[in-house]
Image (cartoon, grey):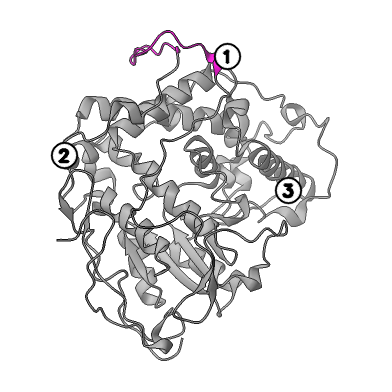
Amino acid sequence: MAAYGQTQYSPALQPAGPYAPYHTQGYSMPSYNIKTEDGLSHSPGQTGLLSYSNFSSTPPSQSLYSYPHTHAYSSYSQSQYPPYYNYNSPYLTSNNISPAAITAPLAYQHPEHPVMLPNHSPESHTGEYHPPPSPPTPGKEEGVSARRGSDGKLRGRKRVSDPAPPLDSDIERVFIWDLDETIIIFHSLLTGTFSSRFGKDSSKAVSLGLWMEEMIFNLADSRLFFNDLEECDQVHIDDVASDDNGQDLSTYNFGSDGFQSPAGAGSLCLGSGVHGGVDWMRKLAFRYRRVKEIYNTYKNNVGGLLGSPKREEWLQLRREMEVLTDLWLTHALKALALINSRPNCVNVLVTTTQLIPALSKVLLYGLGSAFPIENIYSATKTGKESCFERVAQRFGRRAVYVVIGDGAEEETVAKKKNMPFWRVSCRADLEALSHALELDYL
């Protein structure tokens, strides 16, 4: 049995078609088991590194206010959510997190979550959450120089020091991520699936899920115009940009521009399209432009957007969720960072959450640096297949697309489009993903 950080290899199916990363070089995708810190051997449930099938030769004055419960779930039955939120992989049930690995919470007093260390003051913090350091991979040195992969392309450990990002047409590999239960743990906290699957305190899990849900919709409503945009949802932040005349919005009063008429603006947003007069459409575009500005301004400083005391509440919530989920998000962030460190690779997010709440989630979970807002797509109205097609059209047929998720929909679409699929059903799958990325197998 291999030691932690080592791999055991066995040949796997070689894909064919335009999306196969290595088949022209005779490369065999490995499968492996990883021994985690607890000393147990985990099989991430991958058939090789990736799964393939059906391959063919052709390829406003806005201010915070109390959270309205109009967005809350009416109940927490698992039947409300697709069955693929039920995990099917074994997982470590004992708590193997060292208390020293978690930064001490702040002195913010939440009604249901008492502070553990009251000696800290909010002023001593910068307002940003810093996850515990990712576990290192033994046997690998930090400053490894760039080397060529089996496809002959140069892959470095660190991003080339060029301030200009690569053009979409220059991207060689696109990693399309699902959000909920892949990168973040959220829905399964509310349904009880996570606690029952991994042996966690169910009441604590639901409580943290409700707490995060409140923060998500509070931020969406109070800062990201969700009250105005809920019925006018878009797939992408720039979908109504053509209606924007470029007016300076620095002194624009969104609260009194008449966007929501007494008759209600909902009747102007029907189906998957947006319908309205030129003036109304321009006001809609203004809102999406402002959302984009806010995201880009605060994606690395969410605490500054929340302000006190919400900032301290958010910091404590993030820490408690990391403890409950055994650093799930920390491992996901490690994989995202490894992809971002490559000069010609990109992370793209395709989620079934509406666009504005999705942006709120990304900000609150600290994912802003991993996903530029232009790389976030909402499949709420169009479905994931349509979003995948948009992504493929944007980056071109020459790029290799790798889909990472936990759900049946993204897996089905990935197989249909001959895209490799990496299933995430437990934390070990994220650890294995990072390991594969470090070894340049993806």
On the image, which quarter does residue 375 sit in?
bottom right
Tell me which numbered mark, 1 or 3, is placed earlier along the sequence.
1
Q: Is residue 425 visible?
A: no
Residue 161 percent location from the top left of the image: 67, 58
Tell me which numbered mark, 3 or 2, is placed earlier along the sequence.
2
Circle 3 SS class: helix
Categorize mark 3 by other alpha carbons within 10 Å: few (<14), some (14-19), many (20+).
many
Q: Quadrant of the N terminus?
A: bottom left
**Magenta stretch holds residue 120:** yes
Which label is found at residue 289? none
Q: Residue at x 66, y 31 (%)?
A: 262
Q: Label 1 sits on what residue type?
A: Glu
- State the residue lying farthest toward the top: 119
Q: Between residues 97 and 241, which one lies in front from this camera angle?
A: 97
Q: Which residue is mark 1?
A: 123
Q: Is residue 436 visible?
A: yes
Separation of disc 3 and disc 2 at Cα?
52 Å
In front: mark 3 or mark 2? 2
Separation of disc 1 and disc 3 at Cα?
43 Å
384 lies left or right of 270:
left
On the image, which quarter does residue 413 sit in?
bottom left
Q: Which residue is mark 2?
A: 93
Q: Between residues 423 and 96, which one lies in front from this camera angle?
A: 96
Q: Label 3 sits on what residue type?
A: Met
Circle 1 SS class: helix
Tell me which numbered mark, 1 or 2, is placed earlier along the sequence.
2
128 lies left or right of 255:
left
Which label is found at residue 281? 3
Cβ–Cβ under 8 Å for marks 1 and 2: no
SS assignment for the magenta stretch, majority: loop
Query: Magenta segment range?
Result: 107-124
